[in-house]
Image (cartoon, rainbow, N blue to C red):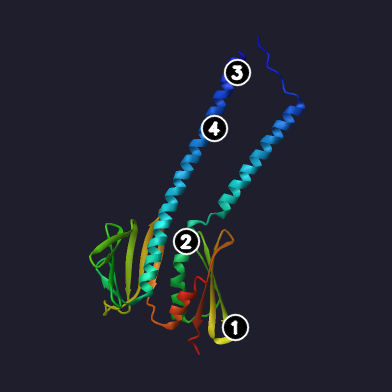
Amino acid sequence: MVKLKAFTLFDSLIAVTITAIIMSTLSLSYGYLIDSDKPMSSMVAQGELPKLLNNLKESKAYFNESKEKETYRIEQIVEQYKGNTNLFLVTFNVIVNSKITYSEQHLVENEER
Amino acid sequence: MSVLVGMVISGLMIGFVYSIYTNLNQMTYNYQSVHTSINAFNIAKADLKREIESTAKISPYPNGFVLEQQNNTIKYYVKENQLIKKQNAAEIVMFENIEAIKLSHTSENNTEALSSIRIDFLVEKQIIPFYIYAINDLQNKLNLSLIHE
């Protein structure tokens, strides 16, 4: 019967530490990779922005709004542009998983005046 | 016995490394295919945007629309789910998977005057809309030129 050499406690500790370091580095890299990837829903939301802008101009509803969809949320922020009452700065923020993935700004004339 | 144990351990190690390699390879292949689809979509979108910016009039066309520019006329239409761009006699496939193309008219009586166009691109089983609205004022043109600054 062949006997295998047993590891000492110290050897096992080193092996476990090295394995833990490798595993944590790999999972950290994977996490960053997944996090950096912009999801497809962000692209769908970006496609909807021209429609929202056109609706805003047609309805002349110059106020802040938030549109919730299944996979994303679009936040519409309307503010006066540099204090000019004739001009609005409209900001659209695309939010996916509570993170702003895309932002776009437009100058819109105040047609109510 | 020790040789057998060594062989088993080596076999396990080789199997483990091979499975990791196969999985990584599959992931890379999938990623490249997604990347290619998104690239094709972005190219088609950029082309449409560029052509629309220099368009004076947009009119309907069977299964598509016509961009009338100063010295040019470009037809975009859908044929067998493909978005085709026809300029002079040349036809180019701009995108392979188009779900639908919807034209909205300013009034029901006037089918020639368009208010908007919606093109649904099918990218990786996801419908991404692309809207075209008339660019008829200075404000819109300025916004379009400033948007990427």
Q: Is residue B101 above or below residue A12?
A: below
Distance between the alpha carbons at the discs numbered 1 and 4:
60 Å
Distance between the alpha carbons at the discs numbered 3 and 4:
18 Å
Give the numbered dot on residue B5.
Answer: 3
Same subunit: marks 1 and 3: no
Crowd around label 1: few <14 · some 14–19 · many ≥20 (10 Å): few
What kind of element bears circle 3?
Answer: helix
Amino acid carrying label 3: it is Val
Amino acid carrying label 4: it is Val
Same subunit: marks 3 and 2: no
Distance between the alpha carbons at the discs numbered 1 and 3:
77 Å
Give the residue at x 41% y 52%: B36
Amino acid carrying label 1: it is Lys
Q: In this figure, which residue is indicated by the disc labeled 1?
A: A82
Give the numbered dot on residue A43.
Answer: 2
Chain name for mark 3? B
Same subunit: marks 1 and 2: yes
